[in-house]
Amino acid sequence: MNARITPVDTPLEVACEHCGRLGVTREAWAEWSVAEQAWVLSHLFDFAFCHHCHRPTRPVERPVSDTDPAAKGAV
Ligand SMILES: [Zn+2]
């Protein structure tokens, strides 16, 4: 399952509303797909968590930035 319905022309990144860094995750359910022989996301919940702030957050979508190396942090 892809949470985005329509394709975008500009690649996006998702940042934390508090600290502005990447590393935001969402809660989701995964369901086993017999056809794909893999776990596939079946539902994406609204709850988001920042692994830098270590607190709930609101994911903020923005165009991918090449100018802020600090924002490139992974989970
Ligand atoms: Zn944060």
Image (cartoon, helix red, strand yellow):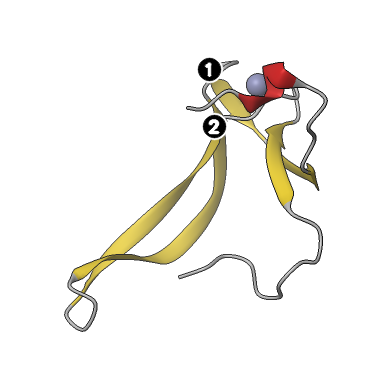
Residue in view at x 54 percent, y 32 percent? 49
The total number of labels drawn is 2
Instruction: Residue at 76% x, 67% y: name it.
Output: 8
CA neighbours of label 2 inside 10 A, class few (<14), some (14 to 19), many (20+): some
Pinpoint residue 74: horizontal percent, then vertical percent. 52, 27
Q: Is the C-beta separation of discs 1 and 2 under 8 Å?
A: yes
- Callout 1: SS: loop
The image quarter in which residue 35 lies: bottom left
Say which quarter of the image contains residue 36.
bottom left
Instruction: State ligand 1's quadrant.
Output: top right
What amino acid type should be assigned to the residue bearing mark 1?
A: His
Residue labelled with disc 2: 49
Q: Which of 16 and 65 is in front in this view?
A: 65
| Place of residue 10 in the rendered image (x, y in percent of width and height, measured from the top left) | 81, 58
58 displayed left or right of 43: right
C-alpha distance separating marks 1 and 2: 7 Å
Rendered position, 57 above or below 31 = above
Give the percent coordinates (x, y) of residue 1: 45, 70
In screen coordinates, is 49 left or right of 71? left
Q: Which of 74 and 40 is in front in this view?
A: 74
| Residue 73 vs residue 48, the one in the foreground | 73
- For residue 41, what is the image quadrant? bottom left
Q: Residue 54 carries which label?
A: 1
Q: Does the residue labelled 1 lie within 8 Å of ligand 1?
A: no
Q: Which of 44 and 66 is in front in this view?
A: 66
Give the residue furthest to the bottom.
Answer: 35
Which residue occupies 53% across, 17% down? 54
> Residue 38: in sight, yes or no?
yes
Q: Identify the residue at horizontal 58%, vertical 23% (top origin).
A: 73
Amino acid carrying label 2: it is Phe
Residue 28, given in percent of the width and then of the height, sits at 42, 54
